[in-house]
Amino acid sequence: MSSLMAKELELIEGFRDLSLVCERTTRSVKLGILKLTNDFLEEVVEKQKTDA
């Protein structure tokens, strides 16, 4: 295995630790992350901080 391929695999493993979606093909590496938020739930959490 060439040192370049070893470095590529090391980087891919590092990205996996970041909980990114990692798809490796023969021509590319695709990385992505998706975060969904709910504004209503965030507002409830903020209001609960001041609610007795």
Image (cartoon, rainbow, N blue to C red):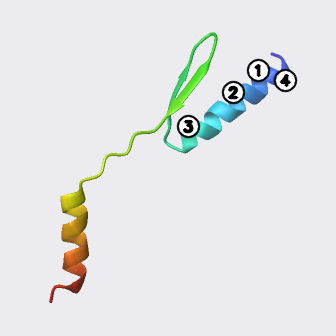
Q: Which circle marks residue 9 in the picture?
A: 2
Residue at the farthest bottom position: 52
Residue 46, x across and y down, in percent = 25, 74
Q: Is residue 23 above or below residue 39?
A: above
SS type, badge 3 = helix
1 or 3: tag closer to the N-terminus: 1
Left or right: residue 7 compared with residue 37: right
Residue 43 lies, with reference to residue 38, above or below; the image says below
Q: Are marks 1 and 3 in contact (CB under 8 Å)?
A: no
The residue where tag 4 is placed is 3
* Residue at image location 80% in from the left, 16% down from the top: 1
Q: Amino acid at mark 4?
A: Ser
Q: Residues within 10 Å of mark 1 (few under 14, many from 20)?
A: few
Mark 1 and mark 2 residues within 8 Å of each other at the beta carbon: yes
Give the residue type at disc 1.
Met
Amino acid residing under circle 3:
Arg
Going from N to C along the chain, the mark reached first, 4 or 2, is 4
Read off the residue under disc 3. Answer: 16
Q: CA distance from mark 4 to mark 3?
A: 20 Å
